[in-house]
Structure formats: C-alpha cells, structure tokens
Image (cartoon, rainbow, N blue to C red):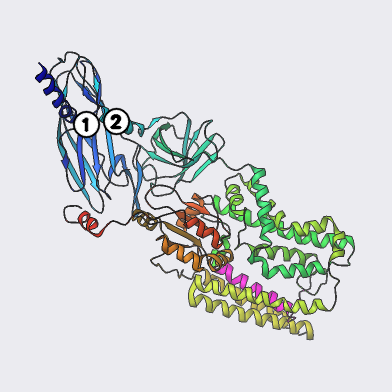
Amino acid sequence: MRAFLLLLALLAPLSARALESEPVASPRARATLVADAAAVAPGATLRVGLRLALSPGWHTYWSNPGDAGEPPSLELSLPDGGTAGAMAFPAPRRIPYGPLVNFGYTGEAVFPLAVTVPANAEPGRLYTVEGTARWLVCEQVCIPEEGAFRLDIPVEAATRPDPVLAALFRTAESSLPVAAPFQVRAGFAGTRGAIELAGADLRPGAVREAFFFPDAPGVIDNAVPQALSVGTGALTLALARGAARVPDRLSGVVAVTDAAGVRAAYAVSAVPGPVPAAPGMPLWQAALLAALGGLILNLMPCVFPVLAMKGLGLVRLSGASRGAVRAGAGAAAAGVVVTFLVVGGALIGLRAAGHAAGWGFQFTEPAFVAALAWLMLAIGLNLSGVYAVRGPSGGGALSSGLWGRFGGGVLAVVVATPCTAPFMAAAIGAALAMPAVSALGVFGAMGLGMAAPLALLAVAPGLARLLPRPGAWMERLRGALAFPMYGAAAWLAWVLSVQAGPDGLLALLAGAVLIGFGAWALGVAQAAEWRFGKAVAGVAVIAALALLPRLSAAPATAVETADAWSGERVAALRAEGRPVFVNLTAAWCITCKVNERVALASPAVREAFSRGRVAVLTGDWTRGDPAISALLRSEGREGVPLYLLYPPGREGGPVVLPQILTEGILVEALSSVRPLPVPSAAAEATRRAPGAG
C-alpha cells in the first residue's frame, strides 16, 4: 500500500503536466491546448483554452482582424453529454503595418472557453477533450498554421484546480472585455463619426489613451488616429467612417489606459445616432487662455517687423488731446480684434466646408505669401518716402490717421499668424470644437489680448504723456523702419521659393518689380502732378495681381526624404526599438525656425539624439498636408509647431513637448526615453532564416 501511494505521488506532477497538451511548434509559434483543473468533478465546468506563444516580431489576430488577417479558430470534440461554449478573445492591440492597421496579439495569447462535463461521468476515469485549431501568424509574410490537440482530464469526486494553469487563465481572463459601466452613444455624419462613454469616473487627467475596436470589419478607417477628448464625466473618441455599411447597432471594445498605465477593456454597444460632441474646455477657460496667448503674441518674432511701426504710431499720440489718443489707440485695437474675428470666421467656415484648415492656413497658399510680400515691399517704399498714402485724415504716412491705425492693427494680425504663442494652441483647438458663436468669442478674446496695450491706452489716454515727444527724430526713425519691411518681404520670398520653386520665385520677383514701378509712378504723380502717374501705378498693381493665379497653380516642391514624417515610418521605427521625435513645421512658421536654430540644432541636443538612437522625422506643413492636419487635430492642435516624442515599441502615445523649445527642455525629455536592446546578429539571422518567415 505504501508503495502504491508513493507511485501516485510520483505520477501526480505528470498528471498535472498532462493538462497542457503536446505542443504544435514552428519557428513562428508554439500552440497547446490547456485546462485550468488538474481534475474535474461530474457535472462541473472547467476552462479550456488555445494557448499561442508567438516568436518575436510575429503576431496573430483578434475576432475582427482589422485591415487584413484571420482570427484563430478552435473546434472541440467531447464525449457524449459534454458541452463547450464559444471561444473568447482578449482585448487586442493595434498592429500598424505600412498603410494598414491590424488588430491582434504579440507575445503570448490565451483564448479561453468553458467546457461542461456530463453529470454521469464516472470518477476514476479520464475525461478526454480533443480539438483542432487553425491560426494565422504574420510578420513580413503571413503563414497559416494548424494542429490537433488532446487533453486527458481525471474525473474525481471534487474538482481540483491546477495552481499554475489556473493562474494563467486568471491572467488571460483579466484582459477579456467586461460589460461597460458607462452610458454609450455613437454616431456618424458623412465620413466623420464618434463614440462616447459617459460615467462619473471619467475626468480629465484620469485617462492616458483609449481606442475603439469595432466588432464588424470595415466600419471605421482603422489607420486614422482616434482623437481622444476627456471631459468631466465623458470620454469621446473621434472615428473616421470606413467603406462598410454602419450596422444597426455599433458594437465593439473600447480599451482604456488610465493615468497609471493600467489597461482595461469594455464591451460597448449603441444604436448609431447623431455624432456625439467631444467634451471640450469651458468657454471661459478657453477665452482666458486665448487672451493670454494673444498678449504674449506681441513678443513673438513674427510681429517684430510691424512692432516698431506700432510704436511709431503710439509716439505720434504723445501730446495729443485725450480724445485723439483714445480714438487713435481704439482704432488700432479695433483693427486687431476685427481681423482676429475675420481670420477665425474664415477658419471656422473652411472647417465646416470639409477643408483641413488650421491656424496660419492662409500661409499654405503661395498666392497669399506673394501678395503679403508685395504688401511689405509697398509699406517699405512708403516709409522710405517713395510715395505717400493720404487717407481721410490727410496723414502722409501709412500709420497716421484713424484708418491708417486701423490698417496697422490689421497688418499686425496678418503678419502674426505664422506664429503661435503659449496657450494659443489649446485655446484654438478648444474653440474649433465649439459652436461657431462661442468659437468666435474665443478668437475675439485672442484679439483683445494682442490689442491689450492699445486698449489700455484707449481706456487711460493720460498714459500718452509718458511717451517720447514727437520731433525730427521721428522722420529718421520712419525711414529706418522701412528696412524691417524689406526684410520681411525677403523672408516671404524665401518661403515662396520653398513652396513653389524657382518658377514661383520668378513670378514673385516680377510682381515686386511691378509694385516698385507702380510706387515710383505714384510718387512722381504726387510730387509733380503727373497726369498719368496714378493710372500707371494702377496698371502696374493690376499686372502684378494677375500673376497670383499662376502662383496658386504652382506644384509643391516638397521632396520625400528618409527623415520625412509618415505614420507608417513612425510605427516601423518604434517596432525596431527606437524612440522617435517628430517635428511638425513649416517654412513660414518663424517660431518653428527659431526653435530649430536655438534648440534642435544645438550640439547638446544632437548628442542626446545620437546617444538615445532617437529617429528624427520632419513633417512639412508649408503647403498644407491632410495627413499632418489629421495628426495635429489628434493632438488637439490646429497649427505648427508641434513636437512629439514617441517611446520605443508599439504601445503608448507620444509626449507632447512645449511649442517654445529650449535646449534644456529637449535634453530632459530625451533623457526619459531609452531605445530597446538591439537583437544580436545571430538571433536576427535565425529569426529571418528561410522557414522562419
């Protein structure tokens, strides 16, 4: 008897190991059939599962594989009276591959199902579970695999869990979707859609990232980023409509990663209706940020060409009556605010019409850049005394008189739009998610912020006494201020050369000659009463404007390079284990160029890029780009610059860096990411050997 008990003790580990079948193995994957019980009682239910261990670089698929692929399947053969449930799929991950995005698994995945033993099963016998499975594994190529499996499970008076495999099943089931404790709404309108989860536990800062995996293939465009918006009590994911018909009930899984990095998956379902609006920033908060951003915009490099002109206009108010000071400062402030409202209204209208327009959108059009360059040249020639502009007030300089001051405010905003200041990006992003009236209120607040120094003088005209007194020095300063205008025109000519190439630059320079000739003709007419001078000037301006359609039709000159941004390139580099830094920029964005010169080009930053094996990709928005516009919107931005730092690997979203960069900010950010280990040459050769895919 003692020898028999000893034999049972020796055989017990073998019995436990028998609850994982013999494996079906290839260089790509190892598959087994597993159960969570070392023994099962008659009438009891146990968990059985297909276990796939995938080699590095290989993946398999969810029930909806995404843009390509096929999910695993398992068919069981049970003794009479036994029943099996449906195989469950854990929450998947996004697996980008070129322009496609698949849904599936890497590493190890367990697909569990419930098996019920018949009540008449006899203790002391074995309950045999047999099954056949098929699965598809992919890397650079896709290979279908299959296998047959067998489990012999002892039948005993009471079910006896297997401690190791039961823990495996608990881990697998923790990644299964659970019923969502939220109210769910979803809807589509044209190509645009969204899904919303509403619940008390949802709040800003509590959610790091989220993604919706639809049950039905083709319902959404899987490759389009799902912009996440989290407000108090609601989470919204923007969706892009796919080619398939939207089902009567939209169902799927929303995977949510909280601020601590813990991922949970929720099964969701909703009857499609109106598109849920993304929870946004309160109007008062957006307006406050807009006003602060507008105030700081006065100090940004874009405004420098006209900042001195504004100062000259203010000096002219020194010694004037309080009424004149109030009117002059008020006219300039009104020019700023009105222009912000016009630019904001145009941006809202373009977005409503389906155009991917963002802040500074007008600078993506070569004709606008050329026209602004000619305007800068014309202002410079005016300041140099080539001709005079005489408005209703009779002033002889462009900045004199109420209309001149109003025009100065308009010009300041037009020139400032290539720049963004701190707080502006968040305010503009929030504004464009609001109703049109509220959005215009935010743009108006931004204008008030930029016009604040002028508005202060209009409210307290006595402050004009602190300004320097007018004198002969003002005429010398006026002549000197022409050269910032010429410099701005030269910068815009360079921008146009990037946008439209040599032919575009030739058209701009020809127009500049015509503008210069027209200014000279007008000046001669004003000085000598030349009868035909004004007509000649008008013809010259019309001839220059006739060149604008040619500039609009000029082809873009952007050249694809190895470091050009694309979503596929980011995914490929991260899959190689490299961190990725993305610089979204434009030739007309002066803030971008200052950041590139001050921070990105510094030796310390270049060394940090090299030390961390950080791949640097550049997205050029000089002529506009729908893909870059979509990326900007997915990060809550409506203009450049935007700097994103992606960690290595397939998981995790980017860190959004400040719009105003310094060497210290970049070096500190780069120190927080580390490349993944590079596989050894031998391991890489083995993985890519024939037969390994």
User: Does residue 272 show up magenta in the picture?
Assistant: no
What type is the residue that disc 1 sits on?
A: Val
Residue 453 in percent (x, y) is at 76, 59
CB under 8 Å between discs 1 and 2: yes
In the rendered structure, the answer to whether residue 380 lies left or right of residue 144 reads right
Label 1: element kind: strand
Name the residue beneath numbered marker 2.
169
Residue 153 lies in quadrant: top left
- In the rendered structure, the answer to whether residue 136 lies left or right of residue 99 reads left
Of the image marks 1 and 2, the number of the one nearer the N terminus:
1
Q: Quadrant of residue 262?
A: top left
Residue at the disc numbered 1? 34
Q: Examine the rendered structure and indicate whether residue 197 appears above or below residue 305.
A: above
Question: Helix, strand or loop at disc 2?
Answer: helix
Mark 1 crowdedness (10 Å alpha carbons): few <14, some 14-19, many ≥20: many
Q: In percent of the image, x 45 and y 35: which residue is there?
A: 272
Residue toward you, 453 or 674? 674
Query: Which region of the structure is painted magenta?
Result: 366-390
* Closer to the camera in the image, 407 or 654: 654
Residue 384 visible? The answer is yes
In this view, the residue in front, 188 or 37, is 37
Identify the amino acid type marked 2.
Phe
How far across and down, in percent of the image, does residue 343 sit?
A: 63, 57
Instruction: Estimate the spatial distance between the alpha carbons at disc 1 and disc 2, rounded to whole Å.
Output: 9 Å
Q: Residue at x 49, y 36 (%)?
A: 196
Vertical order, 460 against 195 (above or below):
below
